[in-house]
Structures are given as structure tokens and as C-alpha cells.
Amino acid sequence: MRKICKIFLSIFLIILFSSSISLSKINKKILMIIAQQNFRDEELLIPKKLFEKEGYSVVIAGTSLKPAKGMLGAVVTPQILIDQVRVDEYDAIVFVGGVGAKEYFNNSIAHKIAKEAVSKNKILAAICIAPRILAEAGVLKGKKATCWAEEGKNLERKGAYYTGRPVEVDGNIVTASGPQAAEEFAKTIIKLLKTKK
């Protein structure tokens, strides 16, 4: 009888432990912000797939709720508008690149999201030309960052230390150079999410 009780207790603890791990991941939400036209497909789809594989919930935001089109033909419908974003609800905010990301360079709402993410100790990430959004928001000043090479000077102009590396991390800010770095970019964000309490 004692043996049976021990077995049941062991099974119960295993189930409880594994469910608490999955719940802690499910409770983590990642916001990915895309352009309405010409976001870079791999920079959205590769990280999204890796985030979801790890059990994180991904929400896509844009300037319209109509289907958004990627540079390589992907079609994705944003779930929320960027002016509806509540930074408190997310553990990470990710700006996706592609030539369409220029629509956010001077977008005050995008800048507000970036600033709030930093002030609330969230992970803030951007890839390709999207790190310029962070630079224009003023959150890269004094920070190491990378981006699509053509935007490097614009990051420096706003006070960032442009490194040119595929992926760069400075505190809770993650930047990446382009689609070829999409997987490393996503894995870096996941690693930071796992180390944050």
C-alpha cells in the first residue's frame, strides 16, 4: 500500500511540475509588429514559429486589420492595431523589418510602444531596418545595436553604437541585421525570456 501511494505521489508531482512549466510559458506573450505592406516574411514567420514551438503566445499588430502582405508573398492578418497595444500585457515586443517597416520610422505610436517597453523592463527587439524605429524613438542612445547595414549610420546619428553583427544584445534590447539572422534573433529573444523572472 505504501509503495502504491509513493507511485501515485510521484506521478502527481511529475504532472504538477510539467504543467507548471507549460503554464509559465503559455502565460508569456510576445507582440510582433509588422508593416501593412512589404514586411520581410522570414523575419516574421521564423521567429513566430520558434516562439510558438516554445509555448509562447504570439500576437501580431499592425496599422490595419486587413491582410498584410510580405515582400515574398506571405499574407498575414494582424489581430490588433498598434494604437490598441497595451505594453503591460506582453513580455517581449518585436518590430519586424522589411522595406515596409519605414512606415514606423516616424510613427509616434510605435515610438511610444518602444519607450514604454524599455521603461517597463520588457524585452524590446527589432530586425533588419526596424532597429531604426528604436533609434528614432530614442531608446538606442548609448546602446550597442545592429541592423541592415544601410541603416547603420542612422543608428549612430541617434547615439547608438552600431556593431554590424548578425545579432546584438544590450540589456533587454535585441537587434538583428536581416532575414539571414532571423533564427538566431528568435533564439536570443527566447533565451532572454527564459532568464527573466
Image (cartoon, rainbow, N blue to C red):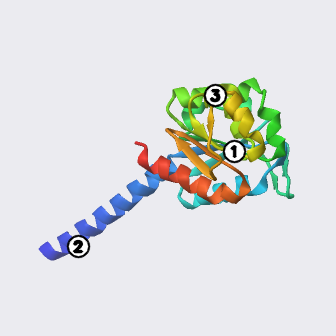
Q: Amino acid at mark 1?
A: Cys
Q: Which residue is mark 2?
A: 7
SS for tag 2?
helix
Of the numbered discs 3 and 2, the one sitting upstream in the chain is: 2
Front: mark 3 or 2: 3
Residue found at x 57% / y 61%: 53
Q: Residue at x 72, y 26 (%)?
A: 109
Crowd tier of the residue under label 2, counting other residues whose Cα lies within 10 Å: few below 14, some 14–19, many 20 or above? few
| Labelled pair 1, 2 in contact (Cβ < 8 Å) | no
> In screen coordinates, is 38 left or right of 88?
right
* Quarter placement of the N terminus: bottom left
Circle number at residue 8: none
Decide which of tag 1 and tag 3 comes sooner along the chain: 1
Q: Is tag 1's residue or tag 2's residue first in the polypeptide sequence?
A: 2
- Return the residue at label 1: 147
Label 3 residue SS: loop
Instruction: Tell me the SS state at disc 1.
Output: loop
**Closer to the camera, 137 or 190?**
137
Is residue 53 positioned above or below 192 on the image? Answer: below
- Left or right of residue 16, residue 146 in this image: right
Q: CA distance from mark 3 to mark 2?
A: 60 Å
Compare residues 16 and 96 and report the one nearer the observer.
96
> Where residue 157 appears, x then y in whole percent?
71, 28
Whether residue 64 appears in this view of the structure is no
Mark nearest the camera among 1 and 2 is: 1
The amino acid beneath tag 2 is: Ile
The amino acid type of the residue labelled 3 equals: Gly
Estimate the x, y position of residue 148 in percent, counting from the top left.
Answer: 74, 46
> What residue do we see at 64% from left, 53% from top?
166
Residue at which label 3 appears: 159
Residue at the location (59% across, 32% down)? 87
Alpha carbon separation for disc pair 1 and 3? 14 Å
